[in-house]
Amino acid sequence: MIVDADCHISSHKFDGLAITADELIAQMDRNGVDKALIWLKPPYNKDIAPENRAVYDASKHYPGRFLPFGWANPRLGDEVTRAAIRQCFEEFGFLGIKFNGAQDGYVIDDATVLPHIEYAASFGKPLAFHSGADFYENTHPYRLGHIAGLFPQTRFLLIHIGGAGTPALDRAAIETAQAHPNITLIGSNVGEHAILRAITVLGADRVCFGSDAPFRMQHVQLAMVRALLRDLPEAAQSAVLGGTILRTCGL
């Protein structure tokens, strides 16, 4: 089974990159991808409520194809953020929540943000964090290590293995995951050497394939990862291409 662990969908085509759930399904069918973990692509006005609902609607319209995650932005205020987290878990039944300090402009382990992470962690679901050199001060892997140490019972997804920019912070991401077994890495928007290094150091059961669609082309990223994995045992290939993310999400 092939599971893409990093896809962004939008409620409508608000820019040239935005893709709807229907368009993502069409890509998945063409590319041989069975399931995709989806979260929103932040709109320019930061009104994420309709986009979280679009993720929910997509998961209901295409049952069994999507692993829906919500999105929380602490910059929108304490009340709004807490209500969004509660809705994502209690009303929508999402499998997890994503925080992105690069796109939303905050330090992920800031003292004002940690209460929202604690509240999200109280639901017992995985929490995902963007990490990368595009805004390394806000999203450095070591900051997620700090968070993972505070909440050792929570499962964390470190997206991009510290990539999403240059120079990539993949060594820091892998070191962080080594120190915190509750962190799993998503190998999206990062070079092949970083993905292979993560598998070698951590094992295939700690690394997931992700395309970062629509920012990257799903079929191109899948072809790259398949080529990267071709000499690894079949069990390791299956883990990276789907088994690891399904297990992390409790499926």
Image (cartoon, helix red, strand yellow):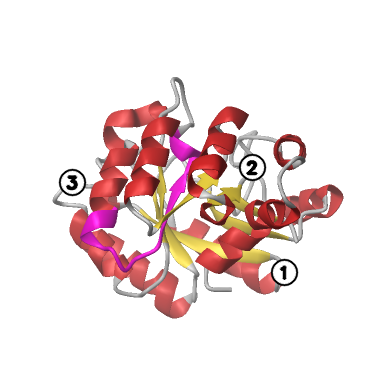
Give the residue at the far right of this rendering. 30
The image's mark for residue 62 is 1
Res. 78 in view: no
Q: Tell me the quarter of the image containing the N terminus.
A: bottom right
* Left or right: where 126 falls relative to 229: left
Residue 99 visible in rendering: yes
> Element at badge 2?
loop
For residue 11, above or below residue 151:
above
Q: Which residues are magenta?
A: 148-162
Q: Amino acid at mark 2?
A: Ser
What amino acid is at disc 3?
Asp
The spot of residue 244 in percent (x, y) is 58, 60
Closer to the camera in the image, 93 or 234: 234
Q: Tag 1, which secondary structure?
A: loop
Eye-nearest disc, 3 or 1: 3
User: Disc 3 and disc 1: Cα gap in Å?
Assistant: 37 Å
The x and y percentages for residue 40 are 52, 52
Identity of the residue drawn at 49% across and 42% down: 201
